[in-house]
Amino acid sequence: MSEWLPLPDVAERLGCKITKVHGLLDERALIALRVGERAIRSVPALFLDGDHVVDSLKGTIAVLADAGFSDEELVSWLFTPDDSLGGRPIDALRAGRKTEIRRRAQILAW
């Protein structure tokens, strides 16, 4: 797994207040897990692209959640290398290959 950002750091990177980050979590545009020794709610840094959330992340989260994935399973799937993709699903999303990733995610529901 790559770098994790505590919620205040996410707010700083996005240039917004922490309440906006909580809103993004509530609307499932972002996923935060409790990580580290202190179990601080954090977001994978690769979920952000500069000063915004990766565009195709929210829809992909919805597809995986509809397939029955927990937040932990969802993050794990996004960061697990897939030889047929030539990398990890998160990298493909960041490269703009959302249709391919969502199609694969939908197949998991069957």
Image (cartoon, rainbow, N blue to C red):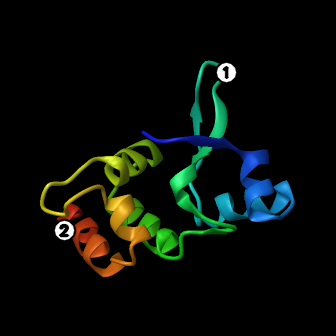
Q: Is residue 14 left or right of residue 53?
A: right
69 left or right, relative to 26: left
Q: Describe residue 109's horizontal placement relative to residue 30 as left or right.
A: left
Residue of label 2: 107
Sequence-earlier tag: 1 or 2? 1
* Residue located 87% across and 60% down the image: 17
Q: Quadrant of the N terminus?
A: top left
Tag 2 secondary structure: helix
Give how far apart the Cα atoms at labels 1 and 2 are. 36 Å
Q: In the visual, does 107 lie left or right of 73? A: left
Tag on residue 16?
Answer: none
Residue positioned 14% across, 55% down in the render: 83
Callout 2: few (<14), some (14-19), or many (20+) C-alpha neighbours within 10 Å? few
Q: Residue at x 83, y 54 (%)?
A: 18
- Label 1 amino acid? Arg
The image quarter in which residue 82 lies: bottom left
What is the quadrant of residue 86 in the picture? bottom left
Residue 69 in view: no
Say which of 11 and 22 sits in front. 11
Mark 1 = which residue?
Answer: 38
Against 32, residue 90 (above or below) is below
Label 1 crowding class (10 Å Cα cut-off): few <14, some 14-19, many 20+? few
Q: Position of residue 59 (x, y in %)?
A: 46, 74
